[in-house]
Amino acid sequence: MTPQKDKLTIQGGIPVRSKPFPGWPVWDEREEKALLDTLHSGIWGAAGEESQVDLFEGEFAQAHQAKYGRCVFNGTAALEVSLRAINIDYGDEVIVPAYTFLATATACLMVGAIPVFVDIDPNTYNLDPDKIEAALTPRTRAIIPVHIGGNPADMDRINEIAHRHHLWVIEDACQAHGAAWKGQRVGAIGDLGCFSFQSSKNINAGEGGIILTNNEELAEMCWSIRNCGRIRQGKWYQHEVLGGNFRMTAWQAAILHAQLSRFEELARRREENGLYLAECLAQVDGFQPLARDERVTQHGYHLFICRYDSAAFNGLPRQSFLEALQAEGIPCSEGYLPLYRMKAIQDGTRRLKHFLSQEDQAKTEPDCPVTERACYSEGVWFTQTMLLGTHADIDDIVTAVMKVKHLSPEL
Ligand SMILES: Cc1ncc(COP(=O)(O)O)c(C=O)c1O
């Protein structure tokens, strides 16, 4: 891993790496059998206690030390059903981190609630617990911490603040399959937890989602809301709760069952390679992985996010760094833009502003300098599949970063 003396690839040099990182998704005869079994069963929907969907939600919940699982068709739906289950109403406010995927905030808007953006911790890019209380108003009903990239948020502080202010906690664990906080897997540390099985996710069925909870009443509400408002003992056309059709198909559940069977092995490999990459990067001034709290006992490693400091790279802007690194054969990206700057969010929020007093409106204006920095100059993402190879693959990442650093004055 010594810095290379030749030219950067964007200047005509030889790339550090010319072969691809491991591909995604992975599958074998387990997925093939699961799909054929589903085909031949004739049960393609979510029907029945012994259906693929019921079986998968039980095993996923168990793998996350949660009592109940409720499958839905994607992670966005999981958030929306969860918000409906705790009865979030028009004009309610929900605390969300400003640095996350769009759906964390749009799920709130879709049920008529206002997402209130709170800045992130500079070391972890997770919701900063120190900033939550200043954003609370009498309308605040819930907090949605996001375990960004699979790195658990500080659930001790967030649950404590929520209890003190009588707020619900919905974990957005859409990127955090298998991640654990003090030995407890995420998802049921708060009141409800949402996961995604969209194509890029560490357990994947193309699309899919699940809600976990230890609360029987909430589990039943989620069951009803995703199932057109039916109740278990009711008649087929008896609808007691305002809900919709958020159901997962048996095809998705069959694939997910097969994916789950190799999940722990892949999670161990990501964890091992993630720790190795962090250790190797310790020697690279100005390119450091996000901090991992000592209470994180397992990182989900959906993303491996680093903080880039252009000053340590001779003033090389992040965009030029990314382009140089990509040319060396290392896929990487800048990641999110601040959510509160999205037109979709601004338009959606404006529609609901009449629910707020002037004073409340002032409080919901975001002030998120750490998010701005993460989005516009600092954050660099590597994806989970890059952690599925060997130490030699990881060494290539470090070699390429050091090569760009060493040769950046020439750019
Ligand atoms: C943090 C976060 N929340 C919510 C979602 C939404 O999940 P889905 O794409 O399955 O709707 C995603 C998925 O990308 C996510 O990363």
Image: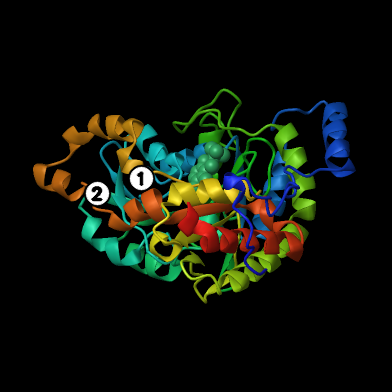
**Corner quadrant of residue 264:** bottom right
Residue 392, numbered label: none
Position in image of residue 251 (x %, y %): 74, 32
Q: Is residue 408 left or right of residue 119?
A: right
Who is closer to the viewer here, 115 or 343? 343
Q: Classify 84 as above or below 316.
A: above
Of mark 1 and mark 2, the one earlier in the sequence is 1
Q: Position of residue 288 (x, y in %)?
A: 50, 67
Q: How is the image coloured?
A: rainbow
Q: Which residue is mark 1?
A: 338
Front one among 330 and 106: 330
Q: Which quadrant: the N terminus?
A: bottom right
Ligand 1 near label 2 (Cβ, under 8 Å)?
no
Q: Secondary structure at mark 1?
A: loop
Q: Residues within 10 Å of mark 1 (few under 14, many from 20)?
A: many
Query: Quick one: label 2, few (<14), some, or many (20+) residues within 10 Å?
Result: some
SS at mark 2 in the image: loop
Amino acid type at circle 1 is Pro
Amino acid type for the residue under numbered disc 2 = Pro
Q: Residue at x 72, y 43 (%)?
A: 24
Q: Which residue is mark 2?
A: 366
Residue 155 occupies which quadrant of the picture? bottom left
Q: CA distance from mark 1 to mark 2?
A: 10 Å
Marks 1 & 2, CB-CB < 8 Å contact: yes
Q: Is residue 312 left or right of residue 40?
A: left
